[in-house]
Image (cartoon, rainbow, N blue to C red):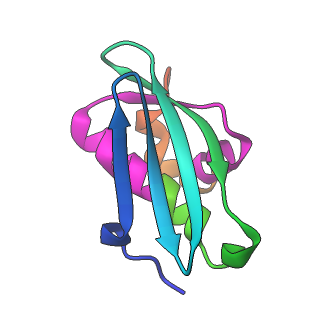
Amino acid sequence: MAIDPSDITFEDNGSKGRYVYRADGAEAEMTFTRAGESLIIIDHTEVPDAFRGQGVGAALVARGVADFRAAGVKVLPLCPFAAAQFRRHPEWADLLQGGNS
């Protein structure tokens, strides 16, 4: 199942935010915290069993990466799943805090 980025909702709560995918009464999310004007910390990714193996978590991270790139901010993926996605996508290395600019 391919997740369309437009099916992912962005919720901004000031210093914190999240990306959410909802379907069939289930909800997956990737949460983040703003650490100043130029750094986003990806805190957590949670995907319920109903979505496992469908690429939902990867789609949440990819949507965030696209938005963070457009905003010109760096990313610190503290969430182990998000960190693994960054390792799988070397083309995202320029977004990593301390990465190539």
Count the marks: how many? 0
Range drawn in magenta: 62-86
For residue 3, which quarter of the picture?
Answer: bottom left
**Residue that appears at 49% across and 58% down:** 60
- Horizontal and vertical percent for residue 87? 64, 48
In the picture, measured across the screen, residue 1 lies left or right of residue 18, that is right
**Residue that appears at 34% across and 25% down:** 14
For residue 34, which quarter of the picture?
Answer: top left
- Horizontal and vertical percent for residue 96? 49, 31
Between 98 and 71, the residue placed more toward the observer is: 71
In the picture, measured across the screen, residue 91 lies left or right of residue 51, that is left
Name, please, the residue furthest toward the front: 25
Work out whether residue 35 can be spotted.
yes
**Residue that appears at 62% across and 46% down:** 82
In the picture, measured across the screen, residue 27 lies left or right of residue 84, that is left
Asked if the magenta segment contains residue 36, the reply would be: no
- Horizontal and vertical percent for residue 47? 67, 61
Relative to 84, does residue 33 appear above or below in the rendering?
above
Relative to 95, does residue 88 appear above or below in the rendering?
below
**Residue that appears at 65% across and 42% down:** 83
